[in-house]
Image (spheres, rainbow, N blue to C red):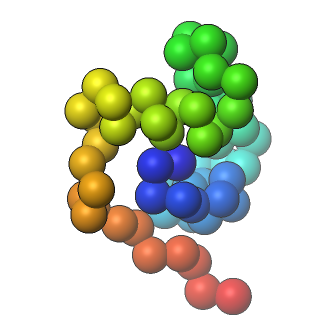
């Protein structure tokens, strides 16, 4: 999420189903009490879980 990937791109990168990604994203938002993905990413940066310029998984081919 912090890399700006969509759910389908995350699923492809992690070799899991789209439903699995949706479930994990929903659970993460709930645990963080975040309203949306953007707020969750901001919290991840604030707490040091991700840093600018960190590793990036390339999107899947079209």
Q: Position of residue 17 (x, y in %)?
A: 67, 49
Question: In the image, is residue 20 above or below residue 59?
Answer: above
Residue 14 in the image, given as x and y percentages of width and height: 48, 54
In the rendered picture of this protein, how many numbered marks are placed on residues?
0
Q: Is residue 22 above or below residue 18?
A: above
Identify which residue, 20 or 47, lies in the foreground: 47
Q: Quadrant of the C terminus?
A: bottom right
- The residue at 62%/21% (across/down) is 34
Does residue 29 appear to the left or right of 44 in the view shown?
right
The residue closer to the viewer here, 50 or 22, is: 50
- Residue 58, image quadrant: bottom left
Q: Residue furthest bottom?
A: 62
Residue 4 in percent (x, y) is at: 54, 59
Residue occupying image coordinates x 45% and y 58%: 3
Using the rendered view, name the quadrant where residue 5 is placed.
bottom right
Q: Is residue 23 visible?
A: yes
Q: In this image, 47 relative to 25: left or right?
A: left
| Residue 24 is at least partly visible in this image | no
For the point 52% across and 48% down, the residue is 1
User: Which residue does the image show at 44% across and 28% down from the upper left?
Assistant: 43
* Picture quadrant of residue 31: top right
């Amino acid at each position: 999420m912090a890399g700006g990937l969509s759910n389908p791109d995350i699923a492809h990168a992690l070799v899991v189903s789209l439903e699995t990604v949706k479930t994990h994203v929903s659970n993460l938002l709930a645990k963080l009490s975040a309203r949306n993905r953007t707020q969750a990413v901001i919290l991840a940066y604030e707490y040091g879980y991700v840093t600018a310029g960190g590793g990036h998984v390339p999107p899947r081919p079209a």
